[in-house]
Amino acid sequence: MSNSVRPTVAAIVTSYYPDSHADVIVGKLLTGYALQGQPVEPRITVASLYLDQEPVDDMGRALATRHGVPVYDSVGEALGLGRPGVNVDGVLIVGEHGDYPINANGQLLYPRRRLFDAAVAAMVAAGRVVPIFVDKHLSWSGADALRMYDTAQRLGIPLLAGSTTPIAWRSPAIDWPLGTPMTEAVTVSYDSPEAYEFHALEALQCLAERRAGGETGVVAVEDIPRTELARARLTGRWSPILETRALQAAGLEGHPLRRARQALAHAFLVEYRDGLRAAVLHYEGGVRNFAVAAESPKGPIDVGFRLEPRRPFGHFALLVRQIERMVLERAAPYPAARTLLTTCLLDAAMRSRGVGGGRIPTPEIAALTYEAPGALPDTATAEEPPFDPL
């Protein structure tokens, strides 16, 4: 497919430096990429770029010049290609990375809603809407995320959001059997709490949404204070058996598993409206993969999620493929409601943690329902990783 017939997109980026999300998403569209080890041509063309910040190691402007992509000073100009109107076929908002404030709850205040609102304002003024992709969670704020989701629904804007975790490799390469009851789940996480707990929530939710009855909403979230973690484990606030199985699915056994259990640093509990209870456990050492263990009527099911730990970061190629599909078909391949749910869960957990723990009701998502997507092409969920994940 030649550049002249490919749909075009505006890339709206917070910060573009080596190995940033802009590099591994927008960069693949600019320079080409490999899908499951095979070179493929991008199916959409980056027609414009907006840089919210330009750090000392910025590579976005030079790369744009090399590929003949204009860099504009505003989101509206990027959508209009320097002219009035919306003159692209889609918008990519890659609002991960950059030098932004952190609030008292430890949340990084990426301006995803500001960038989204600017894109929507340009569409409303032009009388033309095009699909929008928002990388990772919709916003640090659940209220902002709800506003963004509702705006897209009201205006008929196709919206895709989320991380690479639900579409990446798994070990074992299985899914939760569609329509099978799930009564309890434990998911394990590591590294930066807010950024990586979102991945853990996406791992949890892409399985939980397939349970009997589908997604019915979440009524509350509770962070467990660090001083109470040992007591919470002993008193059954989550299943120690599922915790162990999740750590095993993350690739740990023996002494490494025991050391990881001792490195538990954060935990928050999720109360689903239909009675499902889940725990997100975050470790400061030993754990290097996301994994979920959940209880079914036939016994536990354990799934490890595998992201390629080095370049070319092939899991982002899987995400780029889904972005391309949305722009080409003008429909999201999987529901943005999943990302709305996980965004609001993370915000509630961070707010609970910020006040020293306690139960936070989530009325904004207590009745959120959606159907799990069917089989998706160009994903790796049915494949073991072709790389060493550790």
Image (cartoon, rainbow, N blue to C red):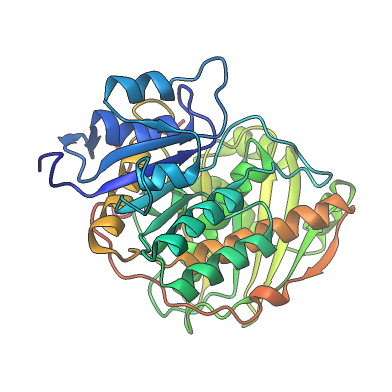
Q: Is the residue 58 above or below the residue 134 in the image? A: above
Residue 85, image x and y in percent? Answer: 37, 54
Determine the residue positioned at 41% across, 56% down.
132
- Visible residue check, residue 297: yes
Residue 157, image x and y in percent? Answer: 41, 66
Residue lying furthest left: 1
Say how many tags the image has: 0
- 229 vs 210, nearest the viewer: 210
Q: Is the residue 289 above or below the residue 70 in the image? A: below
Determine the residue positioned at 61% across, 33% down.
256
- 114 vs 325, nearest the viewer: 114
Q: From the viewer's perspective, tell me whether residue 373 is left or right of residue 184.
A: left
Q: Quadrant of residue 83?
A: top left
Q: From the viewer's perspective, tell me whether residue 67 is left or right of residue 143.
A: left
Q: From the viewer's perspective, tell me whether residue 69 is left or right of residue 228.
A: left
Q: Is the residue 158 above or below the residue 231 in the image? A: below
Residue 76, image x and y in percent? Answer: 46, 47
- Visible residue check, residue 380: no
Determine the residue positioned at 22% across, 34% down.
34
Q: From the viewer's perspective, tell me whether residue 170 is left or right of residue 282.
A: left
Q: Quadrant of the N terminus?
A: top left
